[in-house]
Image (tube, coloured by chain):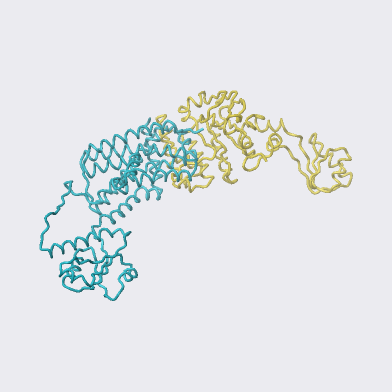
Chain colours: A yellow, B cyan
Amino acid sequence: MDIIVVKNLTKRYGKLIAVDNINFTVHKGEIFSLLGPNGAGKTTTVEMMEGIRKATTGSISILGLDPIKDFAKLRGRCGILPQDFKFIDNSTPYDALSFYSQVLGSKKGVDYTDNIDDILRKVDLMDKKSTSFKNLSGGQKQKLGLALALINDPELLFLDEPTTGLDPQARRSIWDVIREIKKNGKTIILTTHYLDEAELLADRVGIVNKGKFITLDSPNNIVSANHIPDRLIIKGSERIYSSLTDAGYNVRSDDGMYEILMKNPTEVASVFDVLRNNNVTWNDFFMKRDSLEDVFVRLVGKVNEKGDVS
Amino acid sequence: MKFKNVKSYLVLHIKSYMRSRSAIFFQILFPVILMLLFGSIFSGGGTSHTTIAIQNMSPSPASWSFINGLNKSGVFTVNIISSSINIKNYASEHSINSALIIPQNFTYNMINHKIAYVIYYDVPGDSTSAINQQILQNVISNINLHYSNTTPVMGMTTDPILNSAPKTIDYYLPGLMGFTLLNSMFTLLYQVPNYKKDKIFRQFSFTGLTKSEWLLGTIIWSFLITLLADAVLIYVAYAAFGVTLNVSAVSFALSLAIIIASIIFFSALGILAGMVSENEETVTVLGNLILFPMMFLSGVFFPVTMMPSYLRQVSEFLPLTYSVNGLYSILIFNNFGMALYDLGIIIIIAVITFVVAISIFSWKSE
């Protein structure tokens, strides 16, 4: 069942095309990740789905509703963690959750206040529930944003760059919460420029660049479709290079490391036979297989910590 | 609009506010400090004292009688100096603003029915100079009447226009209450650009809170905090200086109406100013541009009637003038007709400003 249907979606700012005629669907219960460098159009796409930005052309259906026309109706069914989440400096996580639970609850005539302690425990903020927002760490602020997105038990979650700028421990902690949410059958739209995040969490990944999808599939399928053959890397003397090239292998040399493309896994034994026959010794060796990151770098370019293509 | 949502926002805002010591200081304590300051300066009832150096070159019962008259005035502290000293140098060296020489021919002239002049030295720029000269003239006139054996043919008695004569501090209270009305503008002037920058308005929109619910919550908050600030102000003015106000059901209702209409206007003005403020520097500049003319030309600290005519004309264009004048008419003069006129003007400008602000204020900024 498709929770989100996006058709021919385009967003223009004057001459700049931020999102260029994209189409995709998101299935119920999956984590769908939009992966791309800064300025690729991820946040613009998500904000159009959230109903806070109007599309120039194209259509979006969220849970069968129009995100702009049915903005109020969707509030009770969606949770949103926006990019660079911030809240009132002097308010506490408990105050913020209490406010959210009362206002969101008033739509459905329910009170989510009873959920507050459970949510605080889920995101590991129970001991900070009375701390002012301005005194929370970056990770704790993101966790509060996540808690606010979860307070009304939404069917669909939009998480826009949930771990940007966080330390590795805080990132892993957020990932654990996202996995927990998925286990409960929620559908999650996750935008990120972290390749490991998308590879670890997402069922399907849409790689976006310059407003267009470059590819859209599961991380494994993207790697399979775009990978180069496995490579054997051997560390050792220059004689490795000469022996193997003389034997007809395609060898790439890089600072004492020699990379040999493998047509199939059985070739590894043949390579070491050649070295043994020529009395060439080696220090170390390992096999290298393409990850999503390798494919991404090949398709888009290398992305730095801030998400910019370098 | 759901009042439950308005209440939820109000609770969130009050809890955040209570954690901000600077906000409590500026909204509640600062007007009280101003009240105590003005009260101490203008309502102490103390008489100003000026030290006057007197050089009596013509000692006689007449000259000592004149000096005694000055001493009894209660204004001068008389300091007799030796006739060998240069009085101007003495006054300068001792930082004395008033000095007087009774010349050698003083007694002789008096006895011979000639005009007996005294020479008075002062600093013309000094604020007490005119008062001191007036008192000297009064003492001299009394001595003239005494020696010419005549009695005054004309006099003057005073009677207050109002039944209960207002004290000076009574006049400052409506002005300072007007000053607390500016809080609603400043709250929004700082809040709107901050919430825009941090995308908190957008965050609110995710909850389903509407623009009108937020605005109503903000106006109710401004009303409550202004009422609290005014109540504290009136209590301090009463406890410390015995301020007297016209209290009746009508004066209370009219004062509340002026406060509510003014808060709606200043909230709308705060939203408009906050929307055009791009950063903290702009907020400060805009805040000062709005604050200072209203503070000094709307009767907050100085009565508008004291100002030259061109400044009085400027004050007529400042909305706070009507809030202060309205409160002044109610609390001092019991003049409800005049207060209704001021209230009418505030309501008109409040409605116009509010409609403009709410129509251009973007909740889900793109």
Q: Nearer the viewer, residue A304 or A35?
A: A304
In which quadrant of the rendered image does the C terminus of chain A lie?
top right
Does B121 sit above or below residue B356?
A: below
Is residue A117 among what the camera can see? yes
Identify whether B310 is placed above or below B366. below
Quarter of the figure with the N terminus of chain A: top right
Left or right? Give the position of B129 relative to A250: left
Q: Quadrant of residue B106?
A: bottom left
User: Which of the two residues, A153 or B283, is positioned nearer the viewer here?
Assistant: B283
Query: Looking at the picture, how far across and down is residue A203, in whole percent?
Result: 61, 32
Count every numbered label the image shows and give the total: 0
Between B138 and B51, the one lying in front of the other is B138
Q: Is residue A114 left or right of residue B89?
A: right
Camera-side residue of A247 and B13: B13
What x and y, as percent, mark residue A241? Answer: 85, 44
Q: Is residue A237 left or right of residue B26?
A: right
Image coordinates of residue A197 in percent, x first then y, are: 62, 38
Q: Is residue B225 visible?
A: no
Q: Position of residue B135 (x, y in %)?
A: 22, 61
Task: Tell me which residue sits at (79%, 41%) in the image.
Answer: A259
Q: Kindly indicate the quadrant of the structure image that contains residue A60.
A: top right
Horizontally, is A179 left or right of B335 in the view? right
